Image: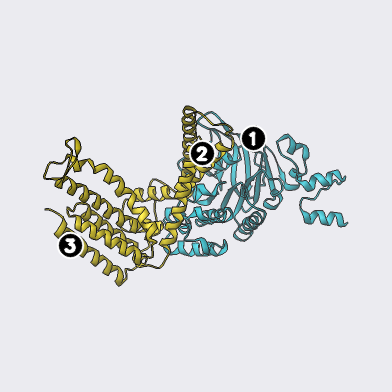
């Protein structure tokens, strides 16, 4: 139990610390922080879409370079940024690696047991990983430089379904409360664990903890619903829209990102 | 226990022998009755599990009684009119985390007025007032989970007051609060009652704070019924009644009873004056 507990506590603490770092970066005065959240949301999502369907590794590499440049200009600590953007591409690299061996084509490297890495296979692996890297880099930039509340307001202003935005808002609001709840549950359990448990019992206890957590989450959900009803909630969530004027630099950012998207389409997307 | 108020009194809240049982069979309240005048301060005092929170939910129409009825300003509360009548009622839950479900404190303050289609300008005006009143300026753009316990409680009350209710139901307002936050909150609640004429119904198990929050007390027992009603003095100096219902008289009362006083004080000031004589 101790190993599971320690790992879980470490993960929870890391998540909470990561969140605090994210909030502090979004509050800094940097290039991307000064851009309107609506413009950032639209521009970066358009760019992500075209990068995701592009077929040119140089384009993806250029976007990655640009993301790191923007990270520097937005005063994001490069180490923290790199740590956030490399995990998912590393995972996707492992997932697509077999394609380097399985794809038919001109051999690049012959290996024992009749295995060979082909040019086409390697291109596919590089292209896929680079695209994932580029998309993740852009999305992390958006998350790190925008307060979550501004992101939600931007979604509302862009007329995204109110149910979807509300679910996101509530998930964000209660994620940390639940993390704290799990933390307290695990610490309480550990404080009453006096001997090293066998693996089977460890898993059973882990399952019980999870069950108790779900019950608490359910009860909390019920209370939150009642509180919302008490404050006037009916089936539809109404909010006040805060229409702020876009500044020239917002238009410039939008224009530049549209130009960049056009470049990605022209040089990277096969039609 | 029936409504004992004079006919001339404007009754804000009346619950007549309401009973409620939760879906799992647990009894929430049993034949509970309370009657509160408009502008009055009343405390519902009872031990843990005596049904105080359930009674508040029944008064807010969040739960429907199995038997008995609830009237708000003389109108019987039903499932159909609950939403309309609830506009008069603000319900502050015991755990402020249940109430502050928006991304920032500002959005939480805006939530109620937005649901009631109050024009944005008017809502902003109210929020400005409440922000000043509750000293929330510095936390307005913060996510609620970054607030301290006292700030959360103040934000939760402000969120409820943004719809300008005439009745405020407050469930265990001082639970898990330090002495300073407790005193500030009690002053706020009394200020709202005195200045804005808001009817205040508070639940608590803390006999020490009850004299500061009420002029009249209802006692709920472990059998989940309202067992007694009377002035603060009558209720809090009746040691037998309190003990029979899982409560204990305030420290000052117990001390002065031991000293042989018949007219026991309830506050430090009263005690000081009694001892000075």
The chain containing the residue under callout 2 comes to B
On the rendered structure, is A112 left or right of A82? Answer: left
Crowdedness near tag 1: few (<14), some (14–19) or many (≥20) residues, C-alpha within 10 Å:
many
- Is B218 placed left or right of A93 in the picture? right
How far apart marks 2 and 3 lie (CA) works out to: 60 Å
- The answer, for residue A93, to whether it is visible in the render is yes
The crowd level at tag 3 (other Cα within 10 Å; few <14, some 14-19, many 20+) is some
Q: Are marks 1 and 2 in contact (CB under 8 Å)?
A: no
Q: CA distance from mark 1 to mark 3?
A: 74 Å
Nearest-to-viewer mark from 1 and 3: 3
- The label number, if any, that marks residue B225 in the structure image: 1
Task: Name the residue furthest bottom.
Answer: A248
Q: Residue at x 75, y 43 (%)?
A: B249
Q: Residue A95: where, in percent of width, then height?
A: 26, 42
With A140 as the anchor, is B136 left or right in this view? right
Disc 2 marks which residue? B63
Q: Residues within 10 Å of mark 2 (few under 14, many from 20)?
A: some
Tags 1 and 3 in contact by the CB under 8 Å rule?
Answer: no
In the rendered image of the structure, the colour used to display chain A is yellow
* x, y percent for residue A33: 37, 65
Observer-nearest of A93 and B210 = A93
**Colour in which the image shows chain B:** cyan
Q: Quick one: B188 or B179, which is closer to the camera? A: B179
The residue that mark 3 highlights is A263
Q: Is residue A91 above or below residue A155?
A: above
Name the residue rendered at 27%, 61% in the picture. A65
């Amino acid at each position: 139990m101790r190993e599971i507990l320690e790992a879980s506590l470490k993960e929870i603490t890391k998540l909470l610390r990561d969140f605090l770092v994210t909030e502090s970066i979004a509050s800094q005065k940097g290039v991307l922080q000064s851009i309107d959240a609506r413009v950032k949301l639209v521009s970066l999502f358009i760019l992500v879409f075209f990068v995701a369907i592009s077929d040119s590794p140089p384009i993806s590499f250029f976007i990655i370079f640009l993301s790191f440049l923007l990270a520097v200009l937005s005063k994001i600590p490069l180490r923290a940024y790199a740590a956030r953007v490399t995990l998912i591409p590393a995972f996707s690299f492992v997932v697509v690696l077999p394609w380097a061996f399985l794809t038919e084509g001109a051999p690049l490297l012959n290996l024992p047991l009749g295995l060979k890495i082909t040019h086409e296979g390697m291109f596919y692996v590089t292209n896929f990983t680079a695209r994932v890297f580029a998309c993740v880099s852009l999305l992390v930039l958006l998350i790190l430089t925008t307060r979550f509340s501004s992101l939600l307001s931007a979604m509302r202003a862009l007329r995204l379904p109110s149910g979807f935005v509300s679910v996101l808002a509530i998930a964000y609001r209660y994620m940390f409360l639940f993390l704290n709840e799990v933390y307290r549950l695990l610490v309480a359990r550990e404080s009453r664990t006096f001997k090293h448990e066998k693996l089977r019992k460890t898993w059973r206890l882990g399952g019980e903890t999870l069950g108790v957590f779900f019950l608490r989450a359910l009860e909390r959900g019920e209370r939150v619903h009642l509180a919302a009803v008490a404050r006037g909630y009916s089936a539809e969530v109404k909010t006040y829209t805060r229409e702020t004027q876009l500044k020239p630099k917002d238009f410039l950012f939008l224009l530049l990102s549209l130009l960049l998207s056009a470049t990605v389409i022209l040089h990277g997307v096969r039609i | 226990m029936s409504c004992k108020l004079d006919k001339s009194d404007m009754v804000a809240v009346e619950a007549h022998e309401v009973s409620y049982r939760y879906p799992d069979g647990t009894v929430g309240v049993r034949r509970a009755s309370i009657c509160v005048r408009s502008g009055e301060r009343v405390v519902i005092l009872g031990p843990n599990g005596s049904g105080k929170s359930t009674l508040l939910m029944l008064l807010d129409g969040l739960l429907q009684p199995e038997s008995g009825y609830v009237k708000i300003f003389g109108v019987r509360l039903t499932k159909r009119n609950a939403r309309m009548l609830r506009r008069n009622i603000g319900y502050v839950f015991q755990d402020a985390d249940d109430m502050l479900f928006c991304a920032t404190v500002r959005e939480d303050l805006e939530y109620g007025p937005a649901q009631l289609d109050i024009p944005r300008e008017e809502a902003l005006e109210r929020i400005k007032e409440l922000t000043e009143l509750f000293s929330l300026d510095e936390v307005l753009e913060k996510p609620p989970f970054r607030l301290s316990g006292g700030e959360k409680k103040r934000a939760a009350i402000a969120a409820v007051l943004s719809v300008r209710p005439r009745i405020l139901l407050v469930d265990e307002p001082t639970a898990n609060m330090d002495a300073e936050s407790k005193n500030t909150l009690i002053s706020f609640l009394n200020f709202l009652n005195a200045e804005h004429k808001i009817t205040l119904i508070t639940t608590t198990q803390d006999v020490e704070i009850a004299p500061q929050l009420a002029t009249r007390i209802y006692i709920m027992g472990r059998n989940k019924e309202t067992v007694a009603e009377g002035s603060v003095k009558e209720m809090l100096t009746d040691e037998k009644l309190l003990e029979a219902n899982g409560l204990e008289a305030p420290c000052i009362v117990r001390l002065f009873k031991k000293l042989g006083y018949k007219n026991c004080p309830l506050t430090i000031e009263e005690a000081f004056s009694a001892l000075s004589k």
